[in-house]
């Protein structure tokens, strides 16, 4: 009995030494991403799960299904790194509704969930940063629990964590990472936190992307893309003149005459040319404004009616007059090879996800970053 107790104490001591060291390093690591794909695919049924190999990790926890059918896991891999794995789109109405509920809202504010809990959040420094409302709802149900889980494991000696997700899960992984960056009480400085957003759509506007890239700079967050995959191109993006930084020549053109005397005095262009340019700018601005309002109506107000049927009592910030979606994270491009086209025949309308699922991403990873024997 005494010998067994000594072995347990020794195991805990060694485990704490391993956990407290910096294992997760900056920079894209193909082996980390490969294991992240294997872990994340465990959410899927046997049809879509990667069956060629098992992840080098053990599942410790799986959350309940919440929000718009959102779910997350916690794994510990073979190195002692804690992996937060976020589920992508599930084959349910509510999960797909989360994708289509694509109006933009402020990256700062609060969401009153269907259970009455008020989720306060900040995802960026700038007041001009906006994010996807459907995925923000998912964050409102899991963000606080993930933060608490990280801190609990930190208290037990763990210092290394990864946030991973594929497709919708990749977009949520980015929002989770930004949420953790702006907690009212910051995470301990000796936590090493890395993000792999695989096949991820665009989670917010340019101001949000700037901020995300800043807080994860120097190789701590990656957006992994198959160039043939259409999902990273979504949602549709519309850039209006109001999406530009405030100081710009187009904004000056749109000002009233009595407010532009100083600008005009410095602008030596012929008046007929300035008049023509202003006419073109106003025409283009009307087109993009109309398009943005249409998108916001269909993917905002109309989708909101369906969301309120699924989550009664939900309240969130008002929609912003913007649809300027931008990708974020350091890009890792998995370039298709001739062998890839032999394995994955170009998708037709009835097979639109052929370039999006786990298997093509794993195949291209192995083609672009062969495993070392």
Image: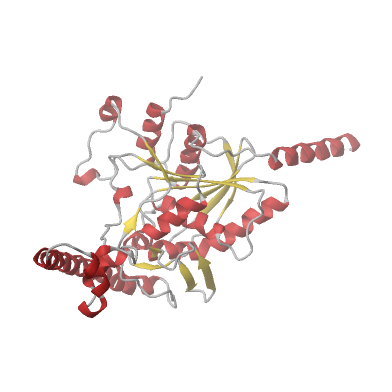
Specify the color scheme: secondary structure
Looking at the figure, which quarter contains the N terminus? top right
Q: Is residue 99 left or right of residue 290?
A: right
Which x, y percent locates residue 337? 30, 27
Which x, y percent locates residue 60? 61, 47
Between 211 and 221, the residue placed more toward the observer is 211
Q: Is residue 317 left or right of residue 294?
A: right
Residue drawn 54% across and 39% down? 26
Residue 240, visible in the rendered structure: no
Residue drawn 24% across and 33% down? 345
Is 280 placed above or below 201 here?
A: below
Which x, y percent locates residue 317? 42, 74
Between 133 and 107, the residue placed more toward the observer is 107
Question: Which residue lies most toward the left here?
Answer: 272
Which x, y percent locates residue 37? 46, 40
Q: Is residue 312 left or right of residue 256?
A: right
Between 138 and 195, the residue placed more toward the observer is 195
Residue drawn 45% across and 51% down? 213
Question: Which residue lies most toward the right here?
Answer: 2
Residue 92, visible in the rendered structure: yes
């Amino acid at each position: 009995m005494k010998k067994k107790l000594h072995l347990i104490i020794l195991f805990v001591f060694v485990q704490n030494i391993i956990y407290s060291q910096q294992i997760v390093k900056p920079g894209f690591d193909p082996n980390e991403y490969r294991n992240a794909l294997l872990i994340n695919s465990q959410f899927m049924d046997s049809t879509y799960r990667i069956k060629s190999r098992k992840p080098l990790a053990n599942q410790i926890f799986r959350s309940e299904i919440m929000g718009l059918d959102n779910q997350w896991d916690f794994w510990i891999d073979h190195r002692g790194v804690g992996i937060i794995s976020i589920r992508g789109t599930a084959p349910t109405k509510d999960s797909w509704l989360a994708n289509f509920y694509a109006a933009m809202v402020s990256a700062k504010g609060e969401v009153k969930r269907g259970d009455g809990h008020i989720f306060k959040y900040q995802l960026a420094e700038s007041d001009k940063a906006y994010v996807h409302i459907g995925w923000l709802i998912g964050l409102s149900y899991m963000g606080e629990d993930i933060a608490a889980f990280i801190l609990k494991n930190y208290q037990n000696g763990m210092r290394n964590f990864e946030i991973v997700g594929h497709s919708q899960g990749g977009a949520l992984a980015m929002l989770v990472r930004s949420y953790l960056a702006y907690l009212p009480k910051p995470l301990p400085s000796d936590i090493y936190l890395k993000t792999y957003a695989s096949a991820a759509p665009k989670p917010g506007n340019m101001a949000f992307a700037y901020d995300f890239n800043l807080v994860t700079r120097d190789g701590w967050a990656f957006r992994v893309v198959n160039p043939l995959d259409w999902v990273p191109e979504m949602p549709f993006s519309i850039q209006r003149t109001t999406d530009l930084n405030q100081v710009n020549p187009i904004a000056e053109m749109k000002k009233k005459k009595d407010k532009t005397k100083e600008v005009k005095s410095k602008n030596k262009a012929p008046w007929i040319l300035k008049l023509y340019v202003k006419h073109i700018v106003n025409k283009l601005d009307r087109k993009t404004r109309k398009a943005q309002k249409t998108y916001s109506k269909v993917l905002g107000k109309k989708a909101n009616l369906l969301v309120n049927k699924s989550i009664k009592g939900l309240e969130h910030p008002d929609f912003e007059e913007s649809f300027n979606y931008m990708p974020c994270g350091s890009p890792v491009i998995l370039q298709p090879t001739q062998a890839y086209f032999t394995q994955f025949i170009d998708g037709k309308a009835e097979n639109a996800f052929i370039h999006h699922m786990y298997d093509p991403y794993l195949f291209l990873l192995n083609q672009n970053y062969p495993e070392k024997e």
